[in-house]
Amino acid sequence: MDFAPLVISPSASVRDALAQIDRGGRQLALVVTEGTLTGVVSDGDIRRGLLRGVGLDDPVSAVLNEHPATVPPTADQGDVDRLKAERGVRYIPVVDASGILLDIIGPDERVAVELSTPVVLMAGGRGQRLYPLTKDVPKPMVPVGGMPMIEVILRRLHAQGFRRVHVSVNYLGHVIEEFLGDGSSLGLQIDYLHETSPLGTAGALAQLDGRIDEPFVVMNSDLLTDVDLRRMLAFHRRVAGGATVGVREYTFEIPFGVVRIEGELVQSLAEKPQHRELVSAGIYVLDPLSLTLLERDRYCDMPTLLGQIIEAGRSVGAFTIHEDWIDIGRVEDLERARAAAERNGV
């Protein structure tokens, strides 16, 4: 579940909590401090508080359940079902050993099945269009909604059942490695692909040749999206091609009137027409055979690799992404992502 619409801060009032419960439509609000679950407030907690004389403008701590029912990321469906029955609750937050909120399991939801599928995050770029924000901080570590964007991505991957992640690093890569470590704090297994020089959007993948024996996901580490990668994997296996590219519709307007002529005569005029094109969303599924097309430590962009796959006689599928998607390439994109995080939560 996307728990962001349920989150409130510890400084919120009972009135704020009530409003958030109403907006979230889940009969509860989650009090979160820097990613850590502080407690849960249900509509029942608020009603009982009001009967005790708690006011709507009192701090939310006056009605806070500081010891809610929670499960670790390793819990199975049986654990969740038993806890729901024992505690008489419909929603179970998933937290790690440090109390970090990872997910929330609703009444009609099942525990995400852990996937063996590896995910590769390309995190070696310099992020020059975000300079000076990236002068001393690698682009994936730029914060969105109170946490580095790469952490946002990793938490979403975990919520979908992914556990194995390879992170390609180059520019200020040590900052990313020191922050993520081996990934255990996020319930993940993370290792690193080190680029001694920029290798493009696909070159670092050559280091995985012989280490992966199933289709795997590759995505840029500056993307915030709600796309269900499990559906994309299912699409890839159904198409049975060498690769699948996530695509989005991009609409742009020509800021002038367009004139179409034949010879010296005008045939038609269109005032500022809109054009629609499908563009790459920076998310891919690759067959492990594609890795044999790469040379270790040699620069290669993803379009080049995809072209080689097609030249080798293998098909490349197109998976259309309709979900929310933000490519944080420019300062205005970052501002838009931060505004969305503030409005809806990360």
Image (spheres, rainbow, N blue to C red):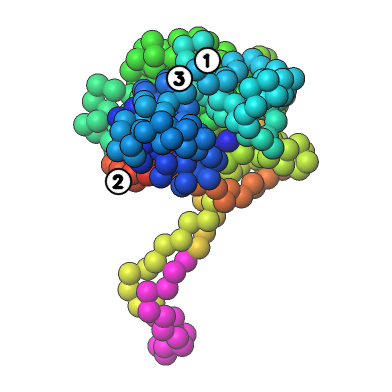
Dominant secondary structure of the magenta stretch? Answer: strand
Which residue corresponds to mark 2?
332
Q: Is residue 267 located in the magenta-colored stretch of the structure? A: yes
Residue at (33%, 37%) from the top-left corner? 55
Amino acid type of the residue tagged 1 in the rendering: Asp
Secondary structure under tag 1 reads loop
Q: Is residue 198 located in the magenta-colored stretch of the structure? A: no
Number of numbered discs present? Answer: 3
Q: How packed is label 1: few (under 14 Cα within 10 Å), some, or many (20 or more)?
A: many
Which sits earlier in the primary sequence, circle 2 or circle 3?
A: 3
Q: Position of residue 227 (x, y in %)?
A: 57, 41
Q: Position of residue 67 (x, y in %)?
A: 50, 17
Which sits earlier in the primary sequence, circle 1 or circle 3?
A: 3
Left or right, 157 with reference to 62? right
Which is more foreground, mark 2 or mark 3?
A: 3
Which residue corresponds to mark 3?
66
Secondary structure under tag 3 reads loop
Measure the C-alpha gap from mark 1 to mark 3: 16 Å
Q: Tell me which segment is drawn in magenta.
A: 259-275
Measure the C-alpha gap from mark 2 to mark 3: 39 Å
- Please state which of residues 20 and 122 is positioned toward the viewer in this rendering: 20
Which residue corresponds to mark 1?
96
Q: How packed is label 2: few (under 14 Cα within 10 Å), some, or many (20 or more)?
A: few
Residue 346 position by quadrant: top left
